[in-house]
Amino acid sequence: MTHVLTVSKALNNNVVIAQDPVLDEVVLIGKGIGFNRKKGDTIEASDAEKTFLLSDKKEMEQYQYLLKHTQPELIEFLNDIIFYIEQRMDKPLNEHIHVALTDHLSFAIKRADSAIHFNNPFLFEIESLYPKEYQVATEIVEKIKGKLAVDFPAGEIGFIALHIHSAITNRQIRDLNKHHLLITKMVDLIEENLDVTLEKHEVNYNRLIQHLHRAIDRVDQGNLLGEENSLKKVLKMTYPTCYNLAWKLVKVMQKQLNRTVDESEVLYLTIHLQRLTNKI
């Protein structure tokens, strides 16, 4: 059965806003799909390479603004980039990426042309925590370099990887950055209390941030590890320094996330910190 929509507005030759009888207002993307289209024309859904819904009115307005103030050739290229991400990640993307990544990359290209660079303080952590997203982001940077002769700084790979991770997990960039800031704060506390300097490119550091990341996620999602009363007594007596530091870290998590942390997290952190001290 043919799925027919009604054109509301052709934003450029490759992007059309249309009325869907079920979904209401949708965005259709496809090469040449908007050429000579006008309001009231009918269009088949199969004519589009991609159909997505931007239910948030502000996002729709932002997307229209982006298309109006960005060269159509660049929009077409960035749409191809988003299609590429979906294929490489082999997962559905939150439709917000069409606004967020298009906005980010269009401005990043302008910044690169003006030799304006932003530092990414979480670059190593992003590469460690989201390796597949980081790899795809690296490929995207190469595609942009090949197509537009734009050289992005290394930090830009991290920003793009975050957008990809946000799109496949339906999590806001600001929440991801909040977690990265928390990890940084906890690592600083560990270094200060254990009087060590952790090298970012060493395996121990990678394992530590992986563990902290999983702990933060568990706390944020309200997942409990379960009671370990017998282990608690042993760890508290055997490794008092690491046990007390683990409690400090948990209190930081509680404050930053505004959530109660399962006491079992203290025990697992104690074990990890003790392993860390043995390898320093």
Image (cartoon, rainbow, N blue to C red):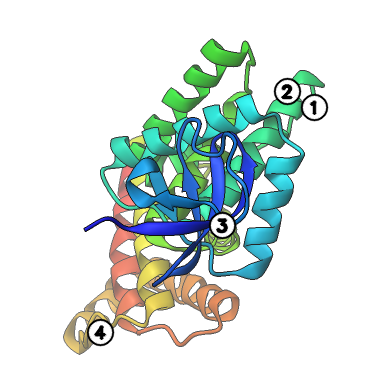
Q: Earlier in the sequence, mark 3 or mark 4?
A: 3
Marks 1 & 2, CB-CB < 8 Å contact: yes
Structural distance between the alpha carbons of marks 2 and 3: 22 Å
Can you identify the residue that label 3 sits on? 173
**Nearest to viewer (mark 3 / mark 4):** 3
Marks 4 & 2, CB-CB < 8 Å contact: no
* Amino acid found under the numbered disc labelled 1: Ile
**Residue at image coords 27%, 74%:** 235
Estimate how packed mark 1 is, as few (under 14), some (14 to 19) or many (20 or more) residues with alpha carbons within 10 Å.
few
Can you identify the residue that label 1 sits on? 116
- The mark found on residue 112 in the picture is 2
Q: Nearer the viewer, residue 73 or 114?
A: 73
- The mark found on residue 233 in the picture is 4
Q: Position of residue 268 (x, y in %)?
A: 29, 69
Structural distance between the alpha carbons of marks 1 and 3: 22 Å
Left or right side of 154 for 203: left
Estimate how packed mark 4 is, as few (under 14), some (14 to 19) or many (20 or more) residues with alpha carbons within 10 Å.
few
**Residue at image coords 45%, 31%:** 80
* Amino acid found under the numbered disc labelled 3: Ile
